[in-house]
Amino acid sequence: MRDLLAVVMLSGIYSLLSASLFLDLDAVDVAFTEAAVGAGISTLLMLASLKLVGRFENKSRYKPGLALGVVLVTGALLIYGTLDMPYFGMADAPAHLHVAPRYINDSMAEIGIPNIVTSVLASYRGYDTLGETLVVFTAGIGVMSLLLVSRQTKEESYKKVPADMQQQIILRVVAKMMLPLILLFALYVQFHGDYGPGGGFQAGVIFAAGIILYTMLFGLGNSQRLFKRKTMELVTAAGVLLYAGVGVVCMLLGGNFLDYNVLRHDPVHGQHLGILLVELGVGITVASVMIVIFFKFTWRTVKHKYKE
Amino acid sequence: MDILLDIISWFFLVMGSFFCLTGGVGLLRFPDFFTRVHSASLTDTLGAGLILVGLMLQAEWGIVTAKLIMILIFSLLAGTTASHAMAKAALNSGLEPYENDKKESSSGEKT
Amino acid sequence: MNILGLYNYWIVVLLMMIGFYIVIAHENLIKKLIGLGIFQTSVFFFYISIGKIAGGTAPILDEKWHLYSNPLPHVLILTAIVVGIATTALGLSLVVRIQEAYGSIEESDIQAQDSLDQLECSLEAYGIRQFENLYDQDLNE
């Protein structure tokens, strides 16, 4: 298939299908994240880069026989390697015997929120989540430095060019109606992550998706008047600072790094507060990084209008 | 009363899945982009809508029903807007609707 | 009967091999990135299918359910999905810059331009040395 637009659309459908498959495998948080990230942001970014690099692929000039052979041999070796793995769905597989029962049994008593995935993500394995937030932050910095925008052209010109989509009245009206609902839903997912599927990442991605919808319909200039570059850079760093800051405050109050028990008079309340602040930091960073990345890609696509 | 509620919700679920299926068949068999967009939007509005109504009858009055109503409203809004956007984009890029030319060829063979 | 219980691993290996094939056999950089995404998704399936317990439910505590699926793979995969999107975004911005620098995103075009550039550089170095020898001879005369 040589039309890359069709390939990107199919990969978006593939992400949505895999999200529904995750749902069938009882992984509700993962399905939520995969649907938001894979079928939403990933497809958007690929479409934006397709606009910049060209839609069609050249014909390949050689037959991939060797690649097919390597793939078949590797696949056969991998299937041979999985022959003594535990069967699908067995309750006494080694994966379920050591750490997981402790999390499932003690999570309510030690942390007190029903969603075990959030409690493991934000409290038991909080250090990993700090690393993940740093990875997202680094990706944002990387994209910012790769797709750099020179200062003069941006400041003088993003006020003048009208949005491409001024004739699309129906889309603009519906987007204006839906945007507050989308942002409200993002906040709901952020703070309800303790009681149902949700949490910081999904909320950040949904917030960014709402802002991206607004940007696509009303123009980059309007959006950038609200989300200026300096502000977004500061906000991105502020999210990570919030997360690490909670850890340092825990150390100052006498506990270990990211040990939320010491934050309040009662360990369970301390855990609640710690998880709330930490998820807020994650959500802020993810939302601003996604918005910044999309702005950088979009700026490159409209840059040609400003070259005289 | 429970049996009646069950039967009605089953009816809605079956009708919803029937419309989803016909929408999918239409997506494959229609000759043109615009007709295919119509059948895809049929899947989104009628199919998903009837399934959601059937699910609403299965759940008791509570937070689940409220969430399902919100999902219904949102998917109706978003689905129809998306198919409108696709059709308008295709029209703006110059895609012509499908013209059925069979009438002219069947009237005379020599022309 | 015993082998059929392992069907989830076969699906995982199939998806993994499809992603692998796309990465090594296609030339277009965007297709390679999409193949990498398929590879990542297959690894997610691997972990999540290990964590599923037959007859269990999602790991959100509720009074009505007693058997929960393992929450630990869910946490790992949540992190992995977000890291995956971060690397995809970086990869796409690299592709955009490559397009601006080389003029195309086909791997063979990029390699041809690179080897041509290397040839030019070495020729230039050789040529300048020759030119310097001529200049010295002129001075000596």
Image: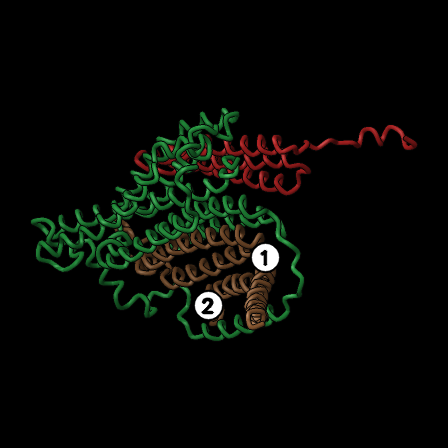
Chain colours: A green, B red, C brown
As shown in the figure, which amino acid type bears the numbered disc 2?
Leu
Say what secondary structure mark 1 lies in: loop
- The residue furthest front is C141
* Left-right relation of A205 to A263: right
Counting from the top left corner in percent of width and height, residue A233 is at 31, 44
Residue at 75% across / 31% down in the picture? B100
Residue C6: mark:
2
Residue at 83% across / 29% down in the picture? B104
Residue at 54% across / 34% down in the picture? B41
Residue at 57% across / 70% down in the picture? C126
Q: Is residue B81 above or below residue A299?
A: above
Q: Is residue A72 above or below residue C66?
A: below
* Observer-nearest of A132 and C61: A132
Counting from the top left corner in percent of width and height, residue A181 is at 36, 32
- Sort mark 2 into few (<14), some (14-19) or many (20+) by Cα contacts within 10 Å: some
Indicate the chain on which mark 1 is placed. Answer: C
Counting from the top left corner in percent of width and height, residue C83 is at 37, 56
Image quarter for residue A96? bottom left
Q: Can residue A23 be seen here?
A: no
Image quarter for residue A70? bottom right
Both on one chain, marks 2 and 1? yes
Q: Please give the residue where the numbered disc 1 appears in the rendered image.
A: C106
As shown in the figure, which amino acid type bears the numbered disc 1?
Glu
Q: CA distance from mark 2 to mark 1?
A: 39 Å
Residue A74: mark:
none
* Observer-nearest of A258 and A78: A258
- The residue furthest right is B110
Q: Can residue A269 be seen here?
A: yes
* Left-right relation of A67 to C91: right
